[in-house]
């Protein structure tokens, strides 16, 4: 990690630790209770993760602007909804210095002690493989000094506590349960919290590890291998043909980090093994 990235990441980590208080009540509930109309009626927020993520992003934006201004950056937002990253921090004194910051949210798994549902860390498709491509990315991947994740982990309210059909007046705000509680923020380089598995069904997205303590410590499967192996592995995911187990002349598409390391002659023992979920 170069000095520019180390300095920016250090400041982003410090900043992230201030955000829980900004979006939470004293009891740890999310301060957002619902939507309001011109009749001053409050509609309860859905527990849908996409809705929660977008509202959190809007709520936090003033704080991101403060952080950028304080540290000599301007923020460039993604031109389109599905473009990477959510925020580009551009150094005002030298616009060649850019940092990609993606805001990622997930929830704790109540049946698995210490685990969350994990994050999707962005595509490993065109712009990731072709570092000069402008497809679905604000600036070409190679122009960023680092690719960072600002992660948000929360606990979902019990379904019995939320009535999405309920409509209340502003005077009844204290009767509305928050759909999420106990928000935890952290910042880390994307490659340091990556797993070697995809993050969302059939789409070409990088998945994260899902043990919360390891996420906070940047303890992903590539920890001992470095960012270059992370890049090489995901650039070749689903494309590189590797030998099938117990076969000398049959091949399959790359799906596991151990396969990639064996194919490239690297020590598979360097894989930082992820903790596995165990039910309570």
Image (cartoon, rainbow, N blue to C red):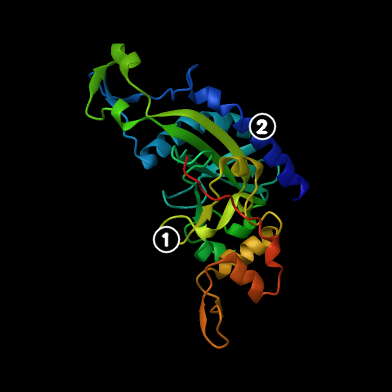
Q: Nearer the viewer, residue 278 or 130?
A: 278
Residue 84: give x, y in percent of width and height: 50, 52
Question: What label does residue 173 carry, if any?
Answer: none
Which residue is at 38% across, 40% downward? 49
Question: What label does residue 203 carry, if any?
Answer: 1
Decide: is 175 above or below 131.
Answer: above
Residues at discs 2 and 1 in contact (Cβ within 8 Å): no
In the current view of this chain or complex, which residue is farthest to the front? Answer: 280
In the current view of this chain or complex, which residue is farthest to the bottom? Answer: 249
Q: Quadrant of residue 187?
A: top right
SS of the residue under disc 2? helix
- Residue 251 is at least partly visible in this image: yes
Residue 8: give x, y in percent of width and height: 69, 40
Q: Residues within 10 Å of mark 1 (few under 14, many from 20)?
A: few
Q: How many marks?
A: 2
Name the residue that disc number 2 marks: 14
In the current view of this chain or complex, which residue is farthest to the top? Answer: 171
Which residue is at 31% across, 32% downward? 159
Nearest to N terminus: mark 2 or mark 1: 2
Which residue is at 44% across, 23% downward? 29
Query: What's the CA distance linking mark 2 and mark 1?
Result: 33 Å
- Residue 72 is at least partly visible in this image: no
Residue 205: give x, y in percent of width and height: 48, 58
SS of the residue under disc 1? loop
Q: Residues within 10 Å of mark 2 (few under 14, many from 20)?
A: few
């Amino acid at each position: 990690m170069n000095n520019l990235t180390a300095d920016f990441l250090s400041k982003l980590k410090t900043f992230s630790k201030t955000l829980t208080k900004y979006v939470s009540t004293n009891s740890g509930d999310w301060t957002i209770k619902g939507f309001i109309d011109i009749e001053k009626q409050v509609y309860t927020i859905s527990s849908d993760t996409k809705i929660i993520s977008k509202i959190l992003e809007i709520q936090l934006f003033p704080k991101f602007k403060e952080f950028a201004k304080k540290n000599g950056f301007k923020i460039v937002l993604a031109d389109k909804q599905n473009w990477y990253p959510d925020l580009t921090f551009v150094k005002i004194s030298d616009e060649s210095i850019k940092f990609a910051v993606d805001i990622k949210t997930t929830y704790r798994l109540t049946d698995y002690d210490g685990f969350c549902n994990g994050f999707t860390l962005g595509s490993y498709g065109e712009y990731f493989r072709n570092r000069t491509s402008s497809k679905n990315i604000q600036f070409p991947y190679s122009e960023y000094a680092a690719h960072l994740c600002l992660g948000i982990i929360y606990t979902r309210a019990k379904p019995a506590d939320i009535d999405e059909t309920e409509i209340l007046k502003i005077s009844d705000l204290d009767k509305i349960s928050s759909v999420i509680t106990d928000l935890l923020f952290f910042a880390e380089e994307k490659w340091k919290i990556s797993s070697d598995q995809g993050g969302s069904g059939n789409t070409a997205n990088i998945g994260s590890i899902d043990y919360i303590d390891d996420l906070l410590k940047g303890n992903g499967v590539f920890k001992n291998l470095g960012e270059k192996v992370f890049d090489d592995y995901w650039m070749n995911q689903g494309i590189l043909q590797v030998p099938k187990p117990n076969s000398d002349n049959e091949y399959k598409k790359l799906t596991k980090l151990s396969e990639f390391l064996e194919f490239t002659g690297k020590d598979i023992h360097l894989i930082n093994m992820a903790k596995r979920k165990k039910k309570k």
